[in-house]
Image (cartoon, rainbow, N blue to C red):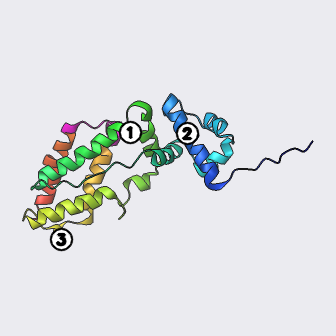
Amino acid sequence: METQKQTRRRGEKLENTILTAAWDQLNKVGYKDLTITEIASLAGTNKTTIYRRWPNKSLLVVSAFSKFVPRPKMHIPNSGNLRDDLVKLFEQLVNQLEFLTSGKFEGLLLDRLRDTSIDKVFGRVDENNALQKFIVIILQRAEKRGELKINQLSQRVLELPFLLLLNEVISTRGIVPKESLTEIVDKILLPVFLRSN
């Protein structure tokens, strides 16, 4: 009797199987109780194969999240004044953070921050940072309305909203009260941004 040769899954097929197993298990047990051992078993592979592609659980879950959940649409507020635009942008971000810090995803955000090296957390905000791009657009609109002069704002000042939000996320363990956002805007960002006018 001939034995059938089992073909080994590789590349995209194996990756999809692992991500599907991770997503299914995440929805069943939640992030805290999710284990690489169980995902490997469900995917018919081993932990070494998973760790070769995703060095830790949080990276695997982020990949599964990206595959199975449509990216939330952010819109850049244009309410007619700088303060309201900043508050509305931050509120959108907090709503997304609340989704990632509650229920099945509880613990994911803090693990991602823990797994990110200090130099990346506190280093320069790179040019691909979506929040910084949104802030620049909001500031350009404010400049057109005569509220400020954007060319007088340093790179450090442009990075300030991202760093303040990151600090708030870390200090509140991912549950950012909306009152904190208005305080950040009113007491820190507006005085700094409007000083250039």
Under tag 3, what secondary structure? helix
**Which residue matches tag 3?**
151
Q: Amino acid at mark 2?
A: Ala
Per the image, is 173 magenta? yes
Look at the image and tell me in which quarter the C terminus lies.
bottom left
How far, Cα to Cα, is label 2 from label 3?
Answer: 46 Å
Q: Which is in the foreground here, disc 2 or disc 3?
A: 2
Q: Residue drawn 10% across and 64% down?
A: 148
Q: How far, Cα to Cα, is label 3 from label 1?
A: 35 Å
The residue located at (31%, 50%) in the rendering is 73
- Residue that badge 1 annotates: 100
| Quarter the N terminus occupies | top right
Q: CA distance from mark 1 to mark 2?
A: 16 Å
Residue name at image x 52 percent, y 39 percent: 23
The span shown in magenta is 169-179
Closer to the camera: disc 3 or disc 1? Answer: 1
**Disc 1 residue crowd, few under 14, some 14–19, many 20+, Cα 10 Å:** some
- Say if the magenta span includes residue 7: no
Which is more toward the observer, 7 or 81?
Answer: 7
